[in-house]
Amino acid sequence: ADTLRAAAAESGRYYGAAVAPHLLGESDYAATLNREFNSIVAENVMKWDATEPNQGQFTFQGGDQLVAHAQNNGMSVRGHTLVWHAQQPGWVQGLTGDNLRRAMLNHIDGVAGHYAGDIDSWDVVNEAFEWDGSRRQSNLQQQIGNGWIEDAFRAADAADPAAKLCYNDYGIDGVNPKSDAVYRMVQDFLARGVPIDCVGVQSHLDSNSDLGTYRQNLQRFADLGVDVQITELDIGGSGAAQANAYRTVTEACMAVSRCTGITTWGITDKYSWRGQDTPLLFDSNYQKKQAYGAVLEALNNA
Ligand code: G3I
């Protein structure tokens, strides 16, 4: 196959990109998205600050635009993200105790309920662990306590029973104390019947990142009984080194049958959150980079 989406589809996988709706009017941006990708995730517009700027008042304009674009172009949609310590609206940051818990549950009900049926997988909870495997001391952790993560998954399951429910994080790309902690949480949730279906491995990487245990790490989550998805892939660098790292990541996903799709965190270096790192598959002029060729080859060879 000669596009990412077609090559991924041959093994039943998707190849996705993080998208900002205000860029869809740029013709090269939309043309590249539509030609190469068959999954969309919102880079920002489905987050808490964007969807519930005032308590109980939901705005879905940007997210609705992305869902419509996906449906009109044969793409699935990942939901990102229901609960996160960052990009919370100001009113959330002032809440304490059970007020925060009830606001979180109401937010999940509002957003996951609105998009019920449209979302393939939700990042229910994002980035709740520290490098050493301890819980991040966010307002959610401090005000609600350890149970906040499973509360969030149960609420998401109630609001959209059809969506796959993911825990998503960075720095869990290899076997390390942080991914060990996520592994134990998933194991515990499965044992106790807390609804969880997938782990999102963000994969914000560099050309010299150690990928020695990348595949093994994906496989151990799959062996627990959840899907894995590479959810925010970008790899700083250029040329052959960048292409090789992209190849390694792609081959790892293709080697793990429960690795169901790959999403790059953007389309073009022009709009990457990592600007100077040029971490994506298309350059600022929407030309295919060497890394693009490596990814396409790895998808096709699997
Ligand atoms: O929309 C406002 C705009 O109105 C304002 O004029 C401008 C001035 O700063 O800011 C705009 O908001 C920015 C927003 O991106 C949209 O561009 C925020 O400042 C900026 O902080 C925000 O950054 C996003 C970041 O998450 C926030 O934490 C990045 O675009 C987005 O790529 C990044 O994505 C995260 C994932 O959600 C979770 N994993 C890590 C990943 C990278 O940090």
Image (tube, rainbow, N blue to C red):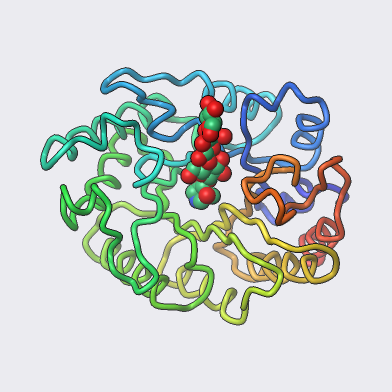
200 displayed left or right of 177: right
Quarter of image, res 286:
top right
Quarter of image, res 94:
top left
Q: Can residue 120 be seen from the camera position used here?
A: no
Report the front residue among 211 and 273: 273
Residue 231: x %, y % from top left: 56, 53
198 displayed left or right of 143: right
Residue 180: x %, y % from top left: 38, 75
Residue 243, relative to residue 49: is it above or below?
below
Name the residue located 65 percent from the left edge and 70 percent from the top edge: 252
What quarter of the picture does the C terminus occupy? bottom right
173 displayed left or right of 242: left
User: Going by the picture, which residue comes out furthest to the left?
Assistant: 98
Residue 117, relative to residue 184: is it above or below?
above
Name the residue located 21 percent from the left edge and 62 percent from the top edge: 192
Q: Can residue 206 be seen from the camera position used here?
A: yes
Residue 20: x %, y % from top left: 62, 32
Quarter of image, res 137:
bottom left
Residue 82, relative to residue 260: is it above or below?
above
Name the residue located 81 percent from the left edge and 31 percent from the top edge: 31
